[in-house]
Amino acid sequence: MTRPCRIALSGLAAGLALTACSSGPTSLSAQVQSWSSSTGFLSGLQQLRSDLRGLSTLPADNAGERRTVCDVLVTDALNDNEQLPSPDSTLTSLLSRAYTKAATAGRDCYRSAASLPATQADAQEATSLLVAAEARYDGITSELPGSS
């Protein structure tokens, strides 16, 4: 291949790459919405909240059921954590901390025959962090005046 053809082809490749890179969402809101859609963020958030609520209603006398519920919580928290990072560093930080607390609560619950105060404290903190993350998500993706 001649030198002019190689230069033309490399220029064409660079142009295509630049076009491909610039075709994605540009605003933070659009980026977060795209990330949320591709990762199933909102359904994962809803499921993890349900898992956390389930800790408070576990029967102490059924170790098998307790371990199953606690293991599901750990699994869901770890799966959700794999979807990070989000396009927003604050949202990522809130979610990472929430997922860590949820997984810790699930692990403690799994090891325990009865509900531990530490498990409940971790579950409550995870829930609070999820609420803060959802508020951050809503603030970023809102179309109301003054949103990000």
Image (cartoon, rainbow, N blue to C red):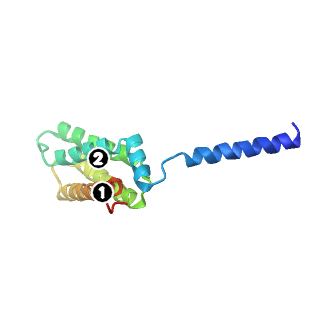
Per the rendering, the mark at residue 144 is: 1
Q: Is residue 57 left or right of residue 52?
A: left
Please report whichever mark, 1 or 2, sits nearer to the chain's N-terminal start: 2
Q: In this picture, is 1 found above or below 51?
A: above
Using residue 83 as the reference point, say whether residue 122 is left or right of it.
Answer: left
**Between 83 and 37, the one nearer to me in the picture:** 37
Q: Secondary structure at mark 1?
A: loop
Left or right of 69 on screen, residue 9 = right
Q: Could you say where residue 95 lies in the image, as x and y percent from the top left?
A: 34, 55
Counting from the top left corner in percent of width and height, residue 73 is at 27, 44
- Neighbourhood count class around disc 1 (C-alpha, 10 Å): few under 14, some 14–19, many 20 upward: few
- Which quarter of the rendered picture does the C terminus lie within? bottom left
| Cβ atoms under marks 1 and 2 closer than 8 Å | no
Question: Residue 25, how many percent across, how many down?
Answer: 48, 48
**Quarter residue 44 falls in:** top left
Which quadrant of the figure contains the N terminus?
Answer: top right
Left or right of residue 52: residue 75: right
Q: What residue is disc 2 on? A: 45
Q: Amino acid at mark 1?
A: Leu
Residue shown at the point (43%, 55%) measured from the top left: 28
Q: Residue at x 49, y 52 (%)?
A: 26
Q: Nearer the viewer, mark 1 or mark 2?
A: 1
Nearest the viewer among 20 and 129 is 20
Q: Position of residue 144 (x, y in %)?
A: 30, 57
Disc assigned to residue 66: none
Q: Relative to 92, say whether 52 is above or below.
A: above
Q: Nearer the viewer, residue 87 or 15?
A: 15
Q: Residues within 10 Å of mark 2 (few under 14, many from 20)?
A: many
Q: Residue at point 42% right, 57% down?
A: 88
Question: Which type of secondary structure does the marked residue at label 2 adopt?
Answer: helix
Of the residues shown, which amino acid type is indicated by label 2? Answer: Leu
**Mark 1 and mark 2: span between their CA atoms?**
23 Å
